[in-house]
Image (tube, rainbow, N blue to C red):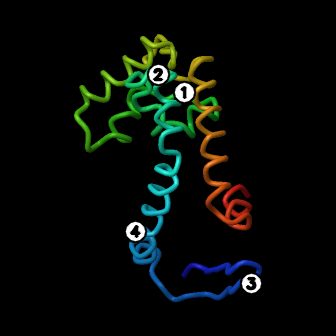
Amino acid sequence: MPDVEISFGDRVVSETVAIDPVRFAALVAPAITRTFISGMHASGDAGRELVRSYGGRAIGNMIDLRNPLAAGRSIAHGELPAAYRYFDPKDVSDSIDRSVDAGLLDRATDGSVSASERGRSFLADLFALHDRTLTERWPGYVLERLNR
């Protein structure tokens, strides 16, 4: 059973809770989704302008794939269907092609993609925007816990 640690400012409550991990995930998923969406939407006009400045639609799936791409990871062509299992494979492929054509992604001979220099610049700007936006909205102790 998972150990649960809940923080209320400087106060931490910690105990073991007898709950199945799958049930726990189902209970917290809606809150995580709401938090994620509100954090991403908080960038508002600045986020839209950032995307426009790097080619708009050419950004495609780079925001979804931001963490592995920013970490310097290549994404194999065969990994994309699993990540986008609810999307039309042609739409995903077209989106990746637009990012490659715009110089945001590099495609290797094996079909894998990685962020180009321009793509890494976009991702750095995106992370900086999210940092500024979330720092304005979330208490410092929350950000400290997220960045551990």
The span from disc 3 to disc 1 (Cα, nearest Å) is 41 Å
Quarter of the figure with residue 95: top left
Q: Is the C-beta separation of discs 2 and 1 under 8 Å?
A: yes
Q: Residue reaching furthest right?
A: 10
Callout count: 4
Q: Residues within 10 Å of mark 3 (few under 14, many from 20)?
A: few
The span from disc 2 to disc 1 (Cα, nearest Å) is 6 Å
For the C terminus, the image quarter is bottom right
The three-letter code of the residue at mark 4 reads Pro
- Per the image, the residue denoted by label 2 is 112
- Per the image, the residue denoted by label 1 is 74
Q: Mark 3 vs mark 1: give the one in front.
A: 3
Q: Sequence order check: which comes first, mark 4 or mark 2?
A: 4
Q: Residues within 10 Å of mark 1 (few under 14, many from 20)?
A: some
For the N terminus, the image quarter is bottom right
- Residue placed most toward the observer, 9 or 86: 9
Q: Is the C-beta separation of discs 4 and 2 under 8 Å?
A: no
- Per the image, the residue denoted by label 3 is 11
